Amino acid sequence: MTLYNNTRLLQALKRQPVDVPPVWLMRQAGRYLPEYRSLRTKAGDFLTLCQTPQLATEVTLQPLRRFDLDAAILFSDILTIPHAMGLGLSFQEGEGPQFERHIETMRDVKALPILEVEEDLNYVLDAVYMIQEELRGSVPLIGFAGSPWTVACYMIEGGSHKNFINARKMAYQAPEVLTALLEKLTIATIAYLKGQILAGVNVVMLFDTWGGLLTPEYYQSFSLVYMQKIIARLKADASTANTPIILFSKGAAVNLEAMADSGVDALGVDWSIDLSSARKRVGAKVCLQGNLDPALLFSTPEKIRVAVKSLLNEWGAHPGLIVNLGHGIEQHTPLENVQALIAAVHEGRG
């Protein structure tokens, strides 16, 4: 068993006392860092970075060299599963992800192959091995996958969209097709996360980025139920049962109680709800992660410090807090402001 020099994240996920709350940032390995932008230029495209374990390892480690973060997060993408299923993923600069083929009918769903993680996504597993060798027990490593609903949104739309209207229409017009797709993605996601855990990640996170687009009823039917299946399978498997799971559904705070009952260890919370209100609603059942607005990092170090102190004081001495943003760090975020946020968290309350 690996002994970690920095155990704040693992302690917080168990809702154990820590000296100060752990802090890490969604998308901390990425485009706000000049060294990342330089490496991406050399690599030629985003997928090459993801699919080359040595490069993915380097990107994962870049923010840890700059900042005193309490965790590393695997550099990858939530769309690796549909890419491995043959939909032809590409990333156009300034346009986001695009697929050569998209899902419209039951025939399309049935044509999707069964995912063989060790063959189809071996580059992700190889990156996990390499990253852990480089980390040498300094901090825990977070792995992740997109939720079935969120991944399905891209597969149905054929790429990114501000409201994923075609996926939402399918929920009303052809729920049997959507359900079949979500079932297939659920099976693939269980295998994918298990593969990451066996390769060495210490925590896994489900990114349900587009769960908040659904009505509360449809959130339960088309998003949460499939995440619950993933969580239940991982928790029932002896090889993965002890790995903490974080669930993040952006814009879905109305469903907070149901999320807390899903079996996860922690819930990510965005800035649409304050953490003290979230804690009152879910009690000490789960750890909470969040929830600073990424736009805060475009203010000043002093304003950032004030906001962090306010969050920490509001939370108080309760265990089970992970400080993070309420969504991914933005591209042009000033580096000195990231440093200010991390330093303020590690100063603690006061």
Image (cartoon, rainbow, N blue to C red):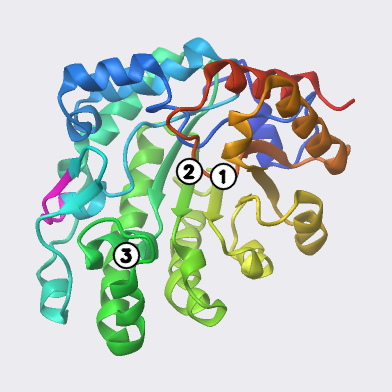
1 or 3: mark nearer the eye: 3
At label 1, the amino acid type is Pro
Residue sitting at the far front = 299
**Nearest the camera: 277 or 34?**
34
Q: Which residue is mark 3?
A: 153
Counting from the top left corner in percent of width and height, residue 47 is at 19, 35
**Which segment is the magenta one?**
84-90
> Within the magenta stretch, is there residue 88?
yes
For the residues labelled 1 and 3, the Cα–Cα distance comes to 26 Å
For the residues labelled 2 and 1, the Cα–Cα distance comes to 6 Å
Q: Please, is residue 179 above or below residue 274 in the view?
A: below
3 or 2: mark nearer the eye: 3
Count of labels in the image: 3
- State which tag comes first along the sequence, 3 or 2: 3
- What secondary structure is found at the residue carrying circle 1? loop
> Within the magenta stretch, is there residue 279?
no
Residue depicted at x 16% and y 50%: 84
Whether residue 69 is visible here, answered yes or no, is: no
- What secondary structure is found at the residue carrying circle 3? helix
Q: Please, is residue 120 above or below residue 102 in the view?
A: above
Is 226 on the left or on the right of 92, as rendered? Answer: right
Residue 185: quadrant of the picture: bottom left
Residue sitting at the far top = 65
Determine which of the numbered discs, if any, sits on residue 204 in the image.
Answer: 2
Is 156 on the left or on the right of 189, as rendered? Answer: left
- State which tag comes first along the sequence, 2 or 1: 2
| Image marks 2 and 1: residues in contact by CB distance under 8 Å | yes
At label 2, the amino acid type is Val
**Nearest the camera: 101 or 136?**
101
Q: Which residue is mark 1?
A: 244
